[in-house]
Amino acid sequence: MPSLSYWFFTTLLCFFSDTVFSGDPFVYFDWTVSYTTLSPLGVKQQVIGINKQFPGPILNVTTNWNVVVNVKNDLDEPLLLTWNGVQHRKDTWQDGVSGTNCPIPAGWNWTYEFQVKDQIGSFFYFPSLNFQRASGGYGGIIINNRAVIPVPFGLPDGDVTILLSDWYTKSHKDLRKDVENGVDLGIPDGILINGLGPYRYDDTLVPNGISYQIINVEPGKTYRIRVHNVGISTSLNFRIQNHNLLLVETEGSYTVQQNYTNMDIHVGQSYSFLVTMDQNASTDYYIVASPRFVNTSWAKATGVSVLHYSNSQGPASGPLPSLPDQDNPSFSINQARSIRWNVSAGAARPNPQGSFRYGDITVTDVYVILNRPPELINGKWRTTLNGISYLPPSTPLTLAQQYKILGVYKVDFPNRFMNRPSKVDVSLINGTYRGFMEIIFQNNDTTVQTYHLDGYAFFVVGMDYGVWTENSRSTYNKWDGVARCTTQVFPGAWTAILVSLDNAGIWNLRAENLNSWYLGQEVYLQVVNPENDSNENILPDNAIYCGLLSSLQRDQSHKFQFSIGSPLSNNSRMISFMLLFLALIVSLHGMCNFEY
């Protein structure tokens, strides 16, 4: 019979084991971001890969998991990765944009740690600095429901991520120089689908020898297809020949389930469709992504991949499925208005989404934000929001706030366009903690713009052509406007959103069109909890210091590994140390069902 000490030791281990296994899991990723040479459009060029993959690996996790991503920067310039749509509850430090993080110097590594708290859905990540997204560095993010929370549709037979991007054979460095010099980006050299060029649907438009994406499916089965526009400036129309797209989710919200034959997906936006393989497979089928709101000279920039049934009788051929009427400006805006929130479905938590009745909440702050085309300010091409072009300071806003450094920024962003000369400034929006903000984007540019807010999902309640007025509120959808993090604003039109400011921190509000963002179309939203400054996560141990705080920076070991010497937080260091004997805990975990 085992000794008393054996039972005591085993019971202690089992208690510890249960404690470990009952918490929210940690998942670890090692990523090296570096250049690699590829030919997505038949021309050799330098692209940005992650672990030599282009696009990068899919970050596939489950809600409430703790995610640890150790990123080594093997580029020749500073790097930050941002997690488009992942909300980082109360933790601005992991946002990965210039206002919240010092860049990771070339040759250094930095570890992101965040929890995907109470969140589900389809998102993506990308490099946020120096126009790098134009060269790649992006990948998909999937946040799954916990097993105990029902999904409002049957379990699909497969899950497919599709990343769409307008693509130039110029490097991101050359493209950003063009933008700085006021040179328009022009027609993309192609549209990539998962980093690959077009299938040769037309011998006159597509040269021979280009690799293209093939998505293999089984007849009669249903697949969840997550589609992201990770490009830099081009709105794209997505469609699959002879197949319906049943929209079920967008950027973390389950939607009213509606069939579409095609969907306009603007820069930075993400959608989930259920697609049933219900055709007779007489041939393969085209998957198409083509530019929207452009003239016929853009026809060469069409992304085409292949949907291949296992019983297909031949290759795809013939004309591509037609594009919606380019001359009808109401088509896309009506399609956007048709996307509704599924208020009867749960999401990350079991309660119905509609239990949050946003239409009954009193608005505390109103901002009408007007953008304009690039203009010369102090001899340089800049873009503005409400007449202000944001120029990132050398010291990130979060560090300046943490160390109470004066003069880095002001909290005086105007709530309306000011009739005065445009200027370059670091001006923040002052958000009321637990307030309810209404933001109206007014697009005075000639192209579709999209705007994204980090740290939040907002309700898209209205959009229309013309100039927004107070009377426009009578058209708002105050019941089932979809909650998402990125919205389009059509040229000469407005879009209105409502957002509940319950996430303390300093959060980036930006144009997702990379040329607009790079030249200054961004602003930060400061949300401070006046009762509890510790409501936001504390400064991480591995913070990188720059600007006015450069003297605080410690040397790095330049080792890309999880160890006590790596720049991890205290929690991760402890977890890394404990991994050495977790195998023992796992092996003893089965002993916890012993009988005395």
Image (tube, helix red, strand yellow):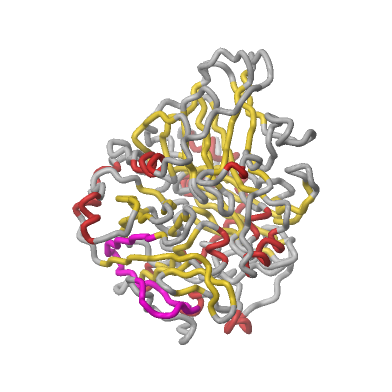
Position of residue 400 measured from the top left corner of the image (x, y, whole percent): 49, 80
> In the rendered image, which quarter is residue 259 located in?
top left
Is 142 colored magenta in this rendering?
Answer: no
**Where 411 falls versus 588 (above or below)?**
below
**Where 248 falls versus 477 (above or below)?**
above
Residue at x 28%, y 36% (from the top left corner): 344
Q: Quadrant of the C terminus?
A: top left
Q: Would residue 478 appear left or right of 529 to someone viewing this image? A: left
Is 427 colored magenta in this rendering?
Answer: yes
Position of residue 398 measured from the top left corner of the image (x, y, whole percent): 48, 73
Residue 592 or 595: which is nearer the viewer? 592
Position of residue 25 measured from the top left corner of the image (x, y, whole percent): 51, 47
Residue 564 in sight: no
Residue 188 or 232: which is nearer the viewer? 188
Position of residue 226 measured from the top left corner of the image (x, y, whole percent): 52, 37
Residue at x 74%, y 31% (from the top left corner): 203
Residue 591 or 80: which is nearer the viewer? 80
Q: Would residue 197 appear left or right of 436 to someone viewing this image? A: right
Residue 113 or 276: which is nearer the viewer? 276
> In the rendered image, which quarter is residue 70 located in?
bottom right
**Where 357 falls versus 546 (above or below)?**
above
The region drawn magenta spans 417-442
Residue 411 in sight: yes
Residue at x 60%, y 81% (from the top left corner): 547
